[in-house]
Amino acid sequence: MPEPAHDPIPLASPPPKPNLPGEVLVREGVDDLIDALAADLYFQARACVRTFGDFHLALSGGSTPEPLYRRLMYDPRLREFPWKKTHLWQVDERCVGEGDDRRNWKMIAGLLLDHSDIPRDQVHPMPVLEPDGDERYERELRTVLEWRERGHDRLDYVLLGMGGDLHTASLFPGSVALEARAGRLVVFNDGPGVVPPRRMTLTYEMLNASRFLCVLVTGEGKREAIGRLVGGGLERSEAPVTGVRPLGGVLRWYLDRGACPVSGS
Ligand code: 6PG
């Protein structure tokens, strides 16, 4: 007896692509998305090492990038990642003690440092407990990047996340760090608007000078926030992520279907 005919497997409709500034890459699920992001990061890292001899990578905390950091360590396709030539920087940090679970560096170091061969003098945790830690980090950035030819003295790849309140890095709506004065690359951020504890963060000036800025946003919990961005008309002070506008570099959003508003735009 022939098997009863089945309906053909329906063609999946492609995930909708929200209309956001810059490039937008949407994948069905987090795994596919991490695949695409990791491939882009790998490509950038190798290209920068070929061109400049090193690669400057700044990473965010939060929970969204954890699967990416794990993937970077175990995926055999990424085995040739040039960790030995990579400088690891932080996008932002919470001003809490080293062992505190809220510390971004604890997560980053636990997932990446312990399993890669990055030379220890190329890792740059933010000195958040030093009273002048912001100025020290700024100096460290300037000093290390100074080795690059002028014009290339910038971060090569910055991984950002986004909160439901549209903050990115530790640039919170209505907070003082949004108005950091020209020339400041790193500042503390505190006061009304900042979700405690106090933070240290790269400024717009530092972020927007980067070669490649990636904003990774996943899950339905962020869908409404993406919808607000798509709606447009938001001031930077209420939606800090809209202040991320690279001067000459690339801005690319990485979204899973869950984070995308149903109609796309
Ligand atoms: C942090 C960040 C922050 C983060 C967003 C998203 O330290 O909190 O760097 O900007 O990327 O808050 O956080 P989730 O990934 O946890 O949603």
Image: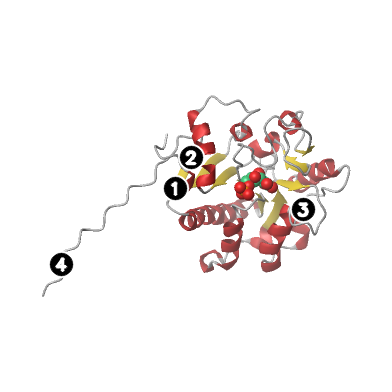
For marks 2 and 4 on the same chain, the one whose residue lies earlier in the sequence: 4
* Residue tagged 2: 23
For marks 2 and 3 on the same chain, the one whose residue lies earlier in the sequence: 2
Q: Nearer the viewer, mark 1 or mark 2?
A: 1
- Is disc 2 in contact with disc 3, using a CB cutoff of under 8 Å? no
Where residue 187 sits, quadrant-wise, is: top right
Q: Nearer the viewer, mark 3 or mark 1?
A: 1
Q: Residues within 10 Å of mark 1 (few under 14, many from 20)?
A: many
For marks 4 and 3 on the same chain, the one whose residue lies earlier in the sequence: 4
**C-alpha distance separating marks 1 and 2:** 16 Å
At horizontal 60% and vertical 42% (from top left) the residue drawn is 162
Checking the image for residue 89, the label placed there is: none
- Is disc 2 in contact with disc 4, using a CB cutoff of under 8 Å? no
Where residue 136 sits, quadrant-wise, is: top right
Q: Secondary structure at mark 2?
A: strand
Amino acid carrying label 3: it is: Pro
Instruction: Work out whether residue 64 or residue 195 is closer to the camera in this orientation and state it.
Output: 195
Q: Nearer the viewer, mark 2 or mark 4?
A: 4
For marks 3 and 1 on the same chain, the one whose residue lies earlier in the sequence: 3
Where is residue 14 drawn, in percent x and y? Answer: 35, 47
* Residue tagged 4: 4
* Residue tagged 3: 125
Q: Secondary structure at mark 4?
A: loop
Where is residue 181 drawn, in percent x and y? Answer: 77, 28
At horizontal 75% and vertical 53% (from top left) the residue drawn is 103
